[in-house]
Amino acid sequence: MNHNLKHWRGLLFSLMLVGVMVTLTSCGDDEPSSTTIEYYLEVEEAFLVDGSASTSSQYYSPITRMREVIRKTYPAPDARGNDDAVMAACDKEFEEYCQMYSGDPYGHITCLFNLIRAVKVGTVVKQNDKLKTYLYDINSIDGNTEN
């Protein structure tokens, strides 16, 4: 009977040791993830033609075009970012879009959005910076075209 008690104590001690090891073992990477820079658009006013969204599908969306330019210019997030290249590409797209739809046959096109630079650590956004605001007011009704 005493011999069986020693086996039970050994088994109990082993289970307790395994339990302590499992409890004190880390379940993931405790190191902070790398910092990355990303760019995105913050839309303040939706894309409208003559004050309505119903006819806007007949036009290229300035929001969609600008997002495509950002992804083409800065395809993968990295630690340094490239503010100058992204802003230059967005400025060029803005000018091209305004030239494309300026004139008599097109409606009054309006849209407002901001180019944002996000600093992320892993998947968590730590900081947002507004780099530039783009205001589309093409073919305004009063004859004054602002870009």
Image: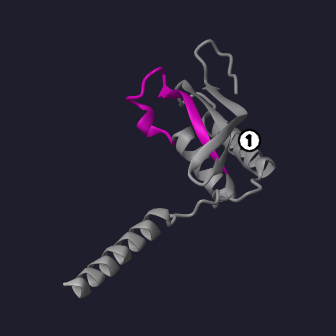
| Residue 140 image-quadrant placement | top right
Circle 1 packing at 10 Å, graded few (<14), some (14-19), many (20+), is some
Q: Residue at x 57, y 39 (%)?
A: 62
Which x, y percent locates residue 17?
A: 42, 72
Instruction: Find the residue positioned furthest to the right.
Output: 84
Q: Is residue 78 left or right of residue 44?
A: right
Q: Residue at x 49, y 39 (%)?
A: 59
Q: Is residue 88 above or below residue 132?
A: below
Write down the residue under mark 1.
91
Numbered-mark total: 1
Q: Determine the secondary structure under disc 1.
A: helix
Which x, y percent locates residue 50?
A: 48, 22
Instruction: Find the residue positioned furthest to the left.
Output: 1
Instruction: Find the residue positioned furthest to the top.
Output: 142
* Residue type (three-letter) at the residue carrying disc 1: Asp
Q: Verify whether residue 58 appears in magenta.
A: yes
Residue 27 in view in this figure:
no
Q: Which residues are magenta?
A: 37-60
Q: Residue at x 31, y 74 (%)?
A: 12
Q: Is residue 76 above or below residue 118?
A: below
Image quadrant occupied by the N terminus = bottom left
| Residue 116 image-quadrant placement | top right
Which x, y percent locates residue 123?
A: 56, 51
Q: Is residue 3 left or right of residue 95?
A: left
Q: Is residue 97 left or right of residue 50?
A: right
Image quadrant occupied by the C terminus = top right
